[in-house]
């Protein structure tokens, strides 16, 4: 099975980031960059398809970013699971080193 058109529908190294595309949409880019992005959009199906999506993006208003409330039954379940983990067993040395490597690579 060979479906070449699917493979080409991808973001490439030459593609501007979603942030740049969004800035392009909001017209906050410098004229030079705008021209570059415009040229890119003319030749890139993927970014062309991304533009209408970004048109729906709205910057979140202040205070809109707080997470929604957890339904009470889910909250009870989560707390019971987390409580079990905390009290049920000790952290082994292996887990400690795992955590350490996480903080090295993650930070
Ligand atoms: Zn592109």
Image: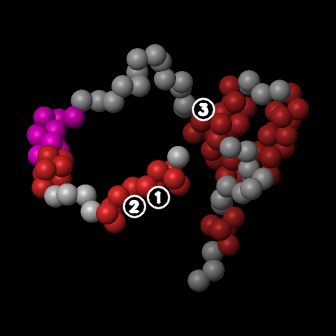
Q: Kindly tell me whether mark 3's CB lies below 8 Å from ligand 1.
A: no
Does the magenta stretch mainly form a helix, a strand or a loop?
A: helix
Give the spatial CA distance, label 3 vs label 1. 40 Å
Up-down: is 36 above or below 56? below
Q: Which residue is mark 1?
A: 101
Up-down: is 88 above or below 61? below
How crowded is the residue under tag 2: few (<14 C-alpha within 10 Å), some, or many (20+)? few
Which part of the image, by quadrant, shows the N terminus?
Answer: bottom right
Give the spatial CA distance, label 3 vs label 2. 45 Å
* Residue drawn at x 13%, y 34% as measured from the top left: 72
Q: Is residue 29 visible?
A: yes
Q: Which residue is mark 3?
A: 55
* Residue drawn at x 46%, y 16% as measured from the top left: 62
Q: Is residue 68 left or right of residue 24?
A: left
In this view, the residue in front, 94 or 36, is 94
Which circle marks residue 75 in the picture? none
Is there CB contact under 8 Å for labels 3 and 2? no
Secondary structure under tag 1 reads helix
Which region shows up in magenta? 70-81
Secondary structure under tag 2 reads helix
* Residue drawn at x 16%, y 58% as measured from the top left: 89
Instruction: Mark 3 or mark 1: name the one nearer the start of the chain.
Output: 3
Colour convention of the picture: secondary structure
Q: Which residue is mark 2?
A: 97
Q: Is residue 48 visible?
A: no
Front label number (3 vs 1): 1
In the displayed image of the protein, which residue is found farthest to the bottom?
A: 1
Residue 86 lies in the magenta-colored region: no
């Amino acid at each position: 099975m060979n479906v070449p058109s699917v493979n080409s529908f991808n973001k490439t190294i030459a593609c501007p980031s979603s942030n740049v595309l969004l800035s392009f949409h909001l017209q906050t880019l410098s004229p030079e960059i705008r021209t570059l992005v415009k040229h890119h959009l003319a030749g890139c199906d993927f970014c062309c398809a991304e533009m209408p999506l970004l048109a729906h993006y709205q910057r979140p208003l202040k205070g809109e970013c707080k997470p929604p409330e957890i339904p009470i039954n889910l909250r009870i379940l989560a707390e019971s699971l987390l409580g079990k983990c905390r009290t049920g067993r000790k952290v082994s040395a292996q887990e400690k080193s795992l955590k350490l490597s996480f903080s090295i690579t993650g930070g």
